[in-house]
């Protein structure tokens, strides 16, 4: 079950946040919309409404969740860039995934949103200088987190959810 829940494992980074790591993570964010679209392309409505694991979200909910989550992250990055250690507002992602749009809307809207969002986000991230990556926000539950760490987390997050869809496709024999 853990392999189905975390097909690429949990996010862990114990190395040094250097230029190579930063560029790699920005590249993963920049390419996410294409990879997510490829993972979801060609799926029927029934397949989109298939959970990627028992008691998990459907493929449709996963695609909409990625858009919701990455919009929130983009805004958090902007808050950090313009405020001093802002306290961010968490959101209840499991409840967002139960809303009508996440459960039934076509995935194309979220895929198009991610195209535009990640284009703008990655372009802006490439302009940040070294000290800006040390700026942080405060999460009411998990505490202070730097932009460098959050960048890695969201590169992982996109890869994590693409793997949910691609591993389901493989298990189900969906070409």
Image (cartoon, helix red, strand yellow):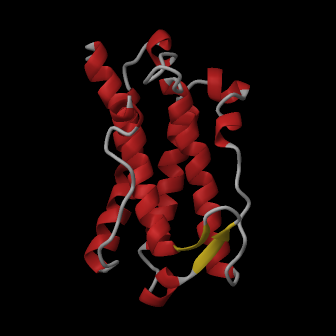
Could you tell me which residue is drawn at 37 percent across and 38 percent down?
A: 162
- 123 w.r.t. 33: above or below: below
Q: Nearer the viewer, residue 170 or 30?
A: 170
Left or right of 73, for residue 7: left
Residue 79 position by quadrant: bottom right
Could you tell me which residue is drawn at 56 percent across and 44 percent down?
A: 67
- 128 w.r.t. 51: above or below: below
Left or right of 166, for residue 123: right
Pinpoint residue 12: horizontal percent, then vertical percent.
36, 60
Residue at the extreme front of the image, as rendered: 1
Could you tell me which residue is drawn at 58 percent across and 61 percent down?
A: 74
The answer to whether one can see residue 52 in this image is yes
- 9 w.r.t. 46: above or below: below
Could you tell me which residue is drawn at 43 percent across and 24 percent down?
A: 52
Q: Nearer the viewer, residue 95 or 125?
A: 95
Pinpoint residue 78: horizontal percent, then vertical percent.
63, 71
Pinpoint residue 149: horizontal percent, then vertical percent.
45, 70
The answer to whether one can see residue 38 in this image is no
Looking at the rendering, in which quadrant would you find the C terminus? Answer: top left
Residue at the extreme bottom of the image, as rendered: 131
- 50 w.r.t. 164: above or below: above
């Amino acid at each position: 079950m853990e392999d189905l829940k975390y097909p690429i494992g949990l996010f862990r980074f114990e190395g040094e946040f250097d230029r190579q790591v930063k560029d790699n993570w920005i590249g993963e964010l920049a390419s996410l919309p294409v990879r997510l679209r490829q993972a979801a392309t060609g799926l029927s409505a029934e397949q989109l409404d298939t959970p990627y694991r028992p008691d998990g979200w459907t493929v449709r909910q996963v695609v909409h969740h990625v858009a919701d989550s990455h919009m929130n992250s983009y805004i958090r990055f902007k808050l950090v860039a313009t405020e001093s250690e802002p306290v961010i507002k968490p959101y209840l992602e499991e409840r967002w995934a139960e809303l009508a749009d996440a459960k039934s809307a076509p995935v194309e809207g979220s895929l198009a949103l991610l195209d535009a969002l990640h284009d703008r986000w990655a372009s802006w991230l490439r302009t940040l200088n070294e000290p800006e990556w040390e700026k942080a926000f405060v999460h009411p539950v998990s505490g202070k987190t730097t932009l460098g760490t959050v960048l890695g987390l969201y590169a992982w997050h996109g890869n994590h959810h693409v793997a949910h869809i691609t591993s389901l496709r493989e298990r189900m024999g969906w070409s």
